[in-house]
Amino acid sequence: MPAGGSVPVIDARGLRKIYRMGEVSVEALRGIDFRLDRGEFTCIMGASGSGKSTLLNIIGCLDRPTSGSYELMGRRVDSMDDDEQAGIRNRFIGFVFQTFNLLPRASALANVELPLIYARVPGRERREKAMHGLERVGLADRASHRPNQLSGGERQRVAIARALVTEPALLLADEPTGNLDSATGKLILELFRGIHAEGNTILLVTHDPSVAASASRLVRIRDGAVESDTTS
Amino acid sequence: MNVSEVALSAFSSLRANRLRSILTSVGVTIGVTAVVTLVGLVTGLQNYIENQFQSVLGATVFEISRFSSGFDDRDSWLQSRHWPHLTADEAVQLSRLMTTASAVTWRAGTSGTVSMGGQTAQDIRIRGLAPTEVEVAGMGLSYGRFYSQAEDGARSRVCVLGSDLARTLGDPASMIGQAVTVRGERFTVIGVAKPLGSIFGHGLDNFVAIPYSTFASIFPDENGDDVEIAVLPRPTVSMAESQEEARLLLRRIRHVPFAERDNFYITTQQGIIQSMEQVTTGAAVVTIGIAAISLLVGGIGIMNIMLVSVTERTREIGTRRAMGARRKDVVRQFLVEAVTVSLVGGILGLLLGFAATILAGKLTPVPAAVSPFAAFLAIGFSSAVGLAFGIYPAWKAARLDPVEALRYE
C-alpha cells in the first residue's frame, strides 16, 4: 500500500450507468464505489455483460456515468466536456487494448509518438521520448518497423510503450493478453509486473483467472455491482 | 498537432492509397486545367485584340457609318438597311461645318483584279479614298506621293498601291509612273504606301487606293454613294466633344426628326475593342461554368473517398481519441487530407493548364499568357473544393463516439 494521506488515483462513488434503448433501459452499473491508490496493480474480473467494460470506459474518461462522482487524481472528471476529457486522457491515462490498435501505416516509433503529438511535445523531444519508450519494452531495434512487420507480442509491447510514453498516472489495460498465445501472454504479464515494480499504477481488466493472478488486488464485478474485492 | 505534422500524416495516408488518391483528384485536375487554360487564353486574346487595334489603327480617330461595327443584334442590322445611304455629299457638308475636326475623310470600297505588265493580283481591295485620308489615317508613303484635291476633283486615273500589292506586281521602287489596270480600267501609279501591317492575321496592304470621285464615277454600282466617314478631332478637343458635334450636325444634314434616334453609328476603336471583349468574356463565362461543373464533380469524388476513408479508419479515430485527440484535432486531420488530395489535383491541373496555354500560344496567333493569376486561381479553387467537400466527412469522423469507434470491427 502507498504512503498514507496521498490522493488516490481513482476515487469513484455511486457510479451508475443506464443505457436507454427506446422504451427499454438497461442498468449497466448499479452504484459502484471504487478506489485505486497510487502504485497499485489491480485486476477487474467479470463475465461479458457484467458491466466491466462500461466501468473501464468511465474510468478511462471515454464515457460518463449517468450518476455518481468520479475523481481522477483529485479532479472531478465525470462532468467534464469532451475536450477536457480528451486532455485528461492524454495527461493521466495510458491505454492498452486487446487488439493493440496501432496505426497500420505508421512505424513503431511514430506509433509511440502519437500521444506526445496531442500533448504538443516538440518533434525532437518527442522522438527521443518515444525511442526511450521502445527501449523500455526492448524494441529499440524495431523502431522503423510497421505493425504488420511485428509479431503479436511485439505489437502489444509497442502499444505498452505508447501507453507509458506520457508517464501517465494510470495504465488501463483491457484484456491485454486476449489476442496472444499463452507463452506470449505470460511475457506481456511479466512486462506489466516490471512496470508495476517501477512504481506505476495499473488497472487491468480480464476474464482470465490466470491473468488475474498477476495482480495484487482482485475486484470481481457481476451484474453491474462489485461482487468481491480481495487483496492478496 | 501542428499543421505541418497534419500535412505529413495526410501525405502518408494518401501514399498508402496512391491510386485511389490520384483517381480522386482527377476531377479537380480537369476542372483546374480548364480554368487555367481559359484564363490564359482569354487574357491572351484580349491583349491580342488590343494590340492589333492599337498598332494598326489610330485610337484617336472615330468613324461614322450606316452600319454598326460592333456585334449588334440582327434586328439593328436589318434596321440599318432601311436607313438612307451615308453619301459623300453629306461627308463634304460635315467636313465644312465641323469646328472640332482637324480633318474629315470618307471611304468606299470594292474588290477586283489588278494587273501591271505581266503580273496579275486577284481579290485586291479597291479603296475609293478622299484625298484627306492622309491627314486622318496618317497613311505614309514609301515612294511617290498621294493624290491631291485637284486630282480628286478631276476624277483623275491615278492610284496609290499598298505595299503587299506593289511587291506582288514587281519592284515597288520603280513603279512610279507605271500603268496599272484596276478592274479593267487604266490608272497611273503615283505612290506606294508604307506597310500598315495586319489585323488578326489578315493583311491590310493588299489594296489600291484611288481618288473617291474617280471611284464613284467608274464603279457606279459599287455603293460609292454609301460611304464610311472618318474624323480626326483637333488635338485640343476631346473625343466625346467632337463626336457629339459630328452627331448633331449629321442629324441636321440627314434631316433626322427631333424625336427619332440617329440613323447612323459612330464608333471608336475603343468601342470595337470593348464589344470584342464582350464576346471573349461571354465565351469565358460559359466555359468557366463547365469548369465549375467539373470542379463540383471532383469535389463530390473527394467527399465520397473521404467518407470511405473515415469508415475504414474508424478504429484509428477511436485510438487517436483515446490518446487525447480532441474533436477538432480529428476534424483538422481529415480536412487537411481532403485539401491535400484536392491541392495535388489542383497543382497537376495547373501544370497541365500551363502546358495547354503554352501549346495554344505556339499553335495559334493568340499570345496565350501564363499568368500568376491563373496559379492563384488554381490553388484557390482546389483548396476551396477540398475544404467545401471535406468538411462533412471530417465532421462525421469527429462526431464518432470514441467507445463505439474503438469497438468497431
Image (tube, grey):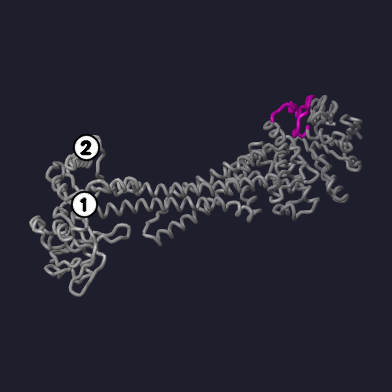
* Callouts 1 and 2 on one subunit: yes
Front in this rendered view, residue B264 or B356: B264
Q: Which mark is residue B316?
A: none
Q: Which of the chains bears the disc numbered 1?
A: B
Q: Position of residue A114 (x, y in %)?
A: 68, 43
Magenta-drawn stretch contains B290: no
Horizontally, residue B302 falls left or right of residue B67, namely right
Magenta-drawn stretch contains A64: yes
Q: Amino acid at mark 1?
A: Asp
Horizontally, residue B382 falls left or right of residue A71, namely left
Which residue position is annotated with label 2?
A: B257
Front in this rendered view, residue B294 or B70: B70
Q: Amino acid at mark 2?
A: Pro
Horizontally, residue B133 falls left or right of residue A150, namely left
Front in this rendered view, residue B272 or B97: B97
Q: Secondary structure at mark 2?
A: loop
Give the quarter of the figure containing the N terminus of chain B: top right
Q: CA distance from mark 1 to mark 2?
A: 21 Å
Horizontally, residue B75 falls left or right of residue A158, namely left
Q: Residue at x 21, y 64 (%)?
A: B163
Q: In the rendered structure, which segment of residues is drawn in magenta?
A: A58-81
Front in this rendered view, residue B192 or B322: B192
Of pointers 1 and 2, the one earlier in the residue sequence: 1
Which residue position is annotated with label 1?
A: B226
